[in-house]
Amino acid sequence: MTVIKINAITVAADSGDELAKRFAARAGAVDGQAGFEGFELLQPTDDRNTWLVITRWADEESFQAWVNSPAFGHGHRSEAERSGQPAPAHVGVSSELWSYAIAGGTSA
């Protein structure tokens, strides 16, 4: 059964573009992870400052294997850090991890 993990990241009002830029430059290490089914970064289209990072996994075990892997740490480092430079300032003010299972709907 597919498991959905949502990282709700609240950013300062002027930091959304930087968050999107950092995700565009992400390492991509998750793409080859066993059980990984997909990823989206959702930008708010109203006055909210909370962006959603949606990942889909074959099961909870696949997600936990990713979180506990060395690739997880690497994938969450900035482009600058991966090239040996100092880490840039955080753009997120806060974040929460939400977990869901698909309970109904239609297929695309």
Image: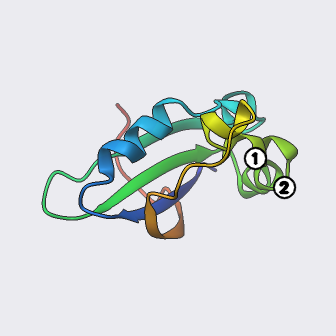
- Tell me the amino acid under the disc marked 2: Asn
Residue 94 shown left or right of residue 72 in the figure: left
> Is 74 situated above or below 90?
above
In contact (CB < 8 Å): disc 1 and disc 2: yes
Rendered location of residue 51, percent (x, y):
35, 56
Q: Which residue is mark 1?
A: 72
Mark 1, other Cα within 10 Å: few <14 / some 14–19 / many ≥20: some
Give the number of marks. 2
Colour style of the rendered protein structure: rainbow
- Tell me the amino acid under the disc marked 1: Phe
Residue nearest the observer in this picture, 24 or 104: 24
Residue at the spot 49% in from the left edge and 56% down from the top edge: 102
> Is 42 situated above or below 60?
above
Residue 10 shown left or right of residue 4 in the figure: left
Rendered location of residue 61, percent (x, y):
79, 55
User: Of the numbered discs in the image, which one, if any, rests on residue 62?
Assistant: none
Residue 51 shown left or right of residue 54 in the figure: left
Quarter of the image where one finds residue 80: top right
Tell me the SS state at disc 1.
helix
Residue 85 shown left or right of residue 18 in the figure: right
Tell me the SS state at disc 2.
loop
Q: Which residue is mark 2?
A: 68
Residue at the spot 23% in from the left edge and 53% down from the top edge: 44
